[in-house]
Amino acid sequence: LVGLGKMGGNMARRLAKAGVKVVGFDIDSATLTALETEGALKAVATLAAVVAALPAPRVVWTMLPSGPISQTTLEALVPMLTKGDVIIDGANANYKDSQKRGAWLAEQGIGFIDCGVSGGVHGLANGYCLMFGGEATHVKKVTPIMQALAAAPDRGWLHCGPIGAGHYTKMVHNGIEYGMMEAIAEGFALLDAKKEFALP
């Protein structure tokens, strides 16, 4: 697991509770050390050490911001990986970028899964909502991980379709969520603004 911020760190904790052995890397050494101390993962100091610590075929999950940092991390990982390995991208990436990355990785013989992750800081206790795209052979390999992270083995996760489908679905998910939040906020603002009724 590469990227151990609030989401990534809690994902490591949830996986550990499910008995999944996690190798973790983050540029913040204090966070990395803290997670290892509490038993959530085995901490390593570099991306190369992540790859070296995993038995092949490997599954490397990146929980990084979308954009340049995700791209440069993928580019750094690829020469270290071997055919049959799988990368899961948990960023809120543009689904078209995910399609391009999937095609590029396929040329190297490396599987790619684009995974939209919802659940925030409450995912540790309640489980995450996971929407992911990828080829069936790679999805089969990572399904036990998805089941461990989700609310239950039979719910909270969905293989949405081919590469790109996961991040596309998460985009729609976010649009619905933020639209509902804005509607609620506007409703309260309207109630608050109507001073003549002294609404509670």
Image (tube, grey):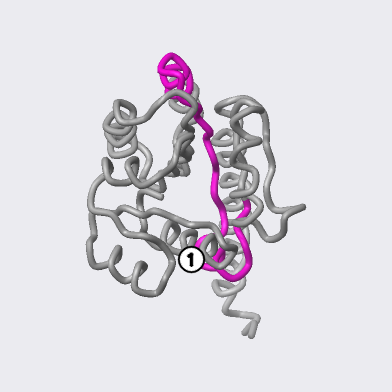
- Quadrant in which residue 140 is drawn: top right
Left or right of 58, for residue 174: right
Mark 1 is on which residue type? Arg
Residue 134, horizontal then vertical, whole percent: 59, 29
Residue 21 versus residue 134 in the image, above or below? below
Circle 1 Cα neighbour tier, 10 Å, few/some/many (<14 / 14–19 / ≥20):
many
The image shows residue 92, relative to residue 191, as above or below, that is above
Locate residue 28 relative to residue 189 in the image: left or right. left
Q: Position of residue 100 (x, y in %)?
A: 44, 20
Residue at 41% x, 48% y is: 63
- The vertical placement of 107 against 95, above or below, is above
Instruction: Return the residue at label 1.
Output: 13
- Residue extending farthest to the front is 55
Of residue 168 and residue 145, the one placed in the foreground of this image is 145
Quarter of the figure that contains the C terminus:
bottom right
In the image: residue 2, left or right of residue 176: left
SS for dot 1: helix
Identified at 55% across, 43% down, the residue is 116
Q: Which residues are magenta?
A: 101-129
Picture quadrant where residue 35 is located:
bottom left
The one nearer the camera, 129 or 104, is: 104
* Residue at the image point whose x is 40% and y is 26% from the top: 82
Q: Position of residue 36 (x, y in %)?
A: 35, 67
